[in-house]
Image (spheres, rainbow, N blue to C red):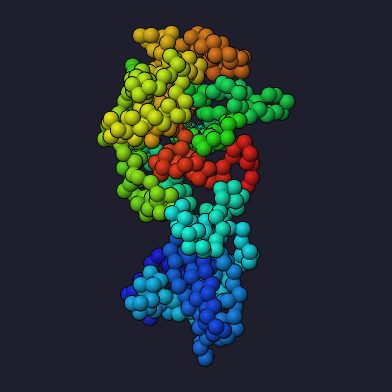
Amino acid sequence: VNVWTRVEALETSMEGKNVTIRGRVQTIRPVGKKMVFLVIRENGYTVQCLVQSQPELVSIQMVKFAASLSRESIVDVEGYVSVPDAAIKAATQQQVEIQVRKLYCVSRAVPNLPINIEDAARSEVEIEKALQEGEQFVRVNQDTRLNFRALDLRTPANQGIFRIQSQVGNVFRQFLLSEGFVEIHTPKLIAGSSEGGAAVFRLDYKGQPACLAQSPQLHKQMSICGDLGRVFEIGPVFRAEDSYTHRHLCEFTGLDVEMEIKSHYFEVMDIVDRLFVAMFDNLNQNCEKELEAVRKQYPFEPLKYLRQTLRLTYEEGVQMLKDVGIEIEPFGDLNTEAERKLGQLVSEKYGTEFYILYRYPLAIRPFYTMPCYDNPKEYSNSFDVFIRGEEIISGAQRVHKPDLLEERAVACGIDVKTISTYIDSFRYGAPLHGGFGVGLERVIMLFCGLNNIRKTSLYPRDPLRLAP
Ligand code: 4AD
């Protein structure tokens, strides 16, 4: 028999009923020696519980015990549901209370917590107000939050963020499965770097030099050579980033896609388009409560996106920047500032904060990117996707001809010996294909207009952080 009632389910129609709940002690307020108010929190919902000494029913020892509890301890409370009078209801915003009969401590928290959850849940506006009113409280900074993440995660905003994150992965998987994609799991220990560049964690693999995979890039492509047709993966990605920015981690979760195409990389962009419109719709419909919890602490405007995602060429983007006096190196990359500015211009002109920029200069794309058929020296069949002016996806058609692949790898300074088995995979007949990679933490950060990727990584890894 399930004797438990969820705090969320408590309501006025239960008046007089005996219930048992389990939750955390959010606050403890003794009134004299005979009464203690406990606010109990379960899954973001709270209820006020009254422990009052009454002959034969509640002993004075029990009141003392209630007063001795520490915040964030986990307790079982048994008692009767009562409905407070209107004035108390208005003051406490509580529909019901519990008149406690029994109280057990299941797990006691230490008395001096490094983070006060209520302080950690304050928005900037609330902090300003509290400061003006001279209230005593501690502003909880990011490092403290991350050092004591198991406590920090208990704020309503964080509860929302990680439930939204779960939903993003869920929608990604369900959408792709319904489109005939196969979920794969590629190795994270590999012989050579998969993206090139210096951002590689190197390690010793039983006497052989090895790397932590910077992406599933090589193995997802080889799966296409193995006729899996359309594949995706949700998995860890390792980047030995030196930069300490608001949007780079040393380990993040990659949502990767690779697929055969008939003729054009726009087939890949079509998947991006439909997948993300479905994703945003789903979040707005199914994560209302979670989004509201995030918004309450970190206010943001709902993302503006179109039913059919806007596509601009890289050249058109550069021209839009030129028109407002921002010069971009010909065939150079857009820096963070230029990307942001372009995001703003696109939003003003087209009314969307989600768009695709395609046909990038070849020189700034990884070696496996297919050069443009009509201008193979300068441009490539590739694209990036942006939310609020920041990149969340990069994708492209891939080189499927082994000789060209080898030539491109050499041109990009890659030691082809370390990727010879990858290049060989294309010698046995290779389908035309393309794909893309999404940074999970960035999607949630930008959808929710948050200012730092550490807020959307459960236990972030950056150049300065390896614990907890
Ligand atoms: O742009 P990236 O490096 O592309 C690839 O890994 C390709 N193999 C993808 C493909 O299929 N062509 O990474 C893809 C995405 C970026 O758009 C960004 O959202 C995220 O991964 N990302 C990072 N997120 C957090 N921290 C970092 N250091 C990131 N680097 C990239």
Which residue is at 45% across, 48% downward?
Answer: 161
In the image, residue 381 above or below residue 7: above
Q: Is residue 6 visible?
A: no
User: Where on the picture, by quarter, is residue 383?
Assistant: top left
Q: Residue furthest right?
A: 207
Residue 456 horizontal/vertical position (percent):
49, 44
Residue 96 horizontal/vertical position (percent):
38, 74
Residue 296 left/right relative to 120: left
* Quarter occupied by the N terminus: bottom left
Given residues 153 and 217, the one toward you in this image is 153
Which residue is at 48% across, 70% downward?
Answer: 39
Given residues 232 and 79, the one toward you in this image is 79
Given residues 178 and 27, the one toward you in this image is 27
Which residue is at 46% across, 29% downward?
Answer: 336
Which residue is at 47% across, 35% downward?
Answer: 439
Given residues 296 and 368, the one toward you in this image is 296
How many discs appear?
0
User: Where on the picture, by quarter, is residue 83?
Assistant: bottom left
In the image, residue 333 above or below residue 28: above
Residue 238 left/right relative to 296: right
